[in-house]
Amino acid sequence: MSTTSSPNVSNSDLETLSDLLRTSSPNQHKSPQISQSLNISKAQVISTPEDKLIELQTQKIELLEKRDQLVKSRANLYNEVNDLRVKLHDLTKEATFNSNQQQLEKLLDSNTKAYIEKLELKNLKNDDYILNNLNVLPSADWNLRLEYIKKFVPFLEIDNINTFNEYQNEQMKRIIEFKLILPLIFKLNIKLFINCDNDILDKIEVSDCFKLSLISSSFTQVLTKNYIPNKKINNLMYALNSFSKLLHTRISIIHKLLKEFKDNLYDTTKYHDLLSDTITDNKRKYAILQNIDEVELKFHINEKPFRLVLNWRIVMGDVIIGTCQSSISLYVIDDSGDGNNSRNLSQIYQTLLSQYDVITSLRIIIKNIF
């Protein structure tokens, strides 16, 4: 019996299918080894060289596409890195610029502040110089004024200067107190009361004027009745300096006169301490001599006793300025009791004083009279 085939399947198709499925042709008899039913799901496809080439081409294309994607991705990343690098550079540059700008501003501010402070200090110094040296108003610095006073009163010494403020009569007063020293003679305590509102001298207080009156009552009256109540501090200081200078001159000359005419002294007991060589304390000598304003000398003419009296007083010569001057008078007194007892030689003595000193003028008169 002949074998019949399917109407629609040719032999060639069966062969191809048989090759793909790795099965025997339907015209062949089934072998014992292939008795199991055909399992298409487990069939293995046999690849041809063309298939492998196609597969390699496909993989190549996929790799190329992947490479292109990676290249594109790398380019994008590179661009991003460049952008970030540029951005970092800009930010760094901006940060550096801002830092430099801030530092520059700080330096400028510091320099400006230092310049302003130096300029203000310079202006203050200029103002102080102008106020202290070029102004025509009295200085408000009383300590400095007292220092200047010392230069204008060389025959006085100013010591124990003390300043303080005190509230009096609903006003603030600045009080300056100091000791005014007439060297080797005595001290005066002086207080100046100054109004703090206008730096005007309100009052002057001077203590121990009694000691001054013992030396010259007329001079003391000018101080107590004119200079002190009228707050004439300049006249007061100048007058005391003039008084001190003249008093030291009188003390020195009278001491020399006593030494030279010690044998002619009318009362030696009165000057015993001054003539003694045992006294070395100048203060004690000055304490005695400052109150001596009269010297009496004894002489004889034809055994008749005469007394020559020299009187030297210190008086105020110019009240407006405060200059002191000497008032010297000379008398001859007849102690015998006959006739006119005294004779005034003051005019003659003043004429001699215009040319000679006190002791020389006295020598001339003694030489011509006795």
Image (tube, rainbow, N blue to C red):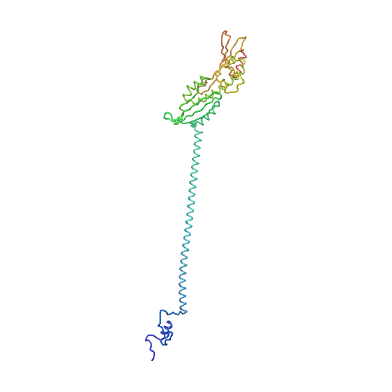
Residue 267 point in image, percent of width and height: 58, 15
Q: Nearer the viewer, residue 124 or 248?
A: 248
Residue 363 point in image, percent of width and height: 61, 16
Residue 205 point in image, percent of width and height: 48, 25
- Total labels: the figure holds 0
Quadrant of the frame with the N terminus: bottom left
Q: Is residue 71 above or below residue 86?
A: below
Q: Is residue 221 above or below residue 133?
A: above
Residue 43 point in image, percent of width and height: 42, 80
The single residue placed furthest to the bottom in the displayed view is 1
Say whether residue 15 is left or right of residue 340.
Answer: left
Q: Nearer the viewer, residue 121 or 37?
A: 37
Q: Nearer the viewer, residue 213 or 119?
A: 213
The single residue placed furthest to the top in the displayed view is 338
Asked where in the image residue 51 lies, by quadrant, the reply is bottom left
Quadrant of the frame with the C terminus: top right
The single residue placed furthest to the left in the displayed view is 7
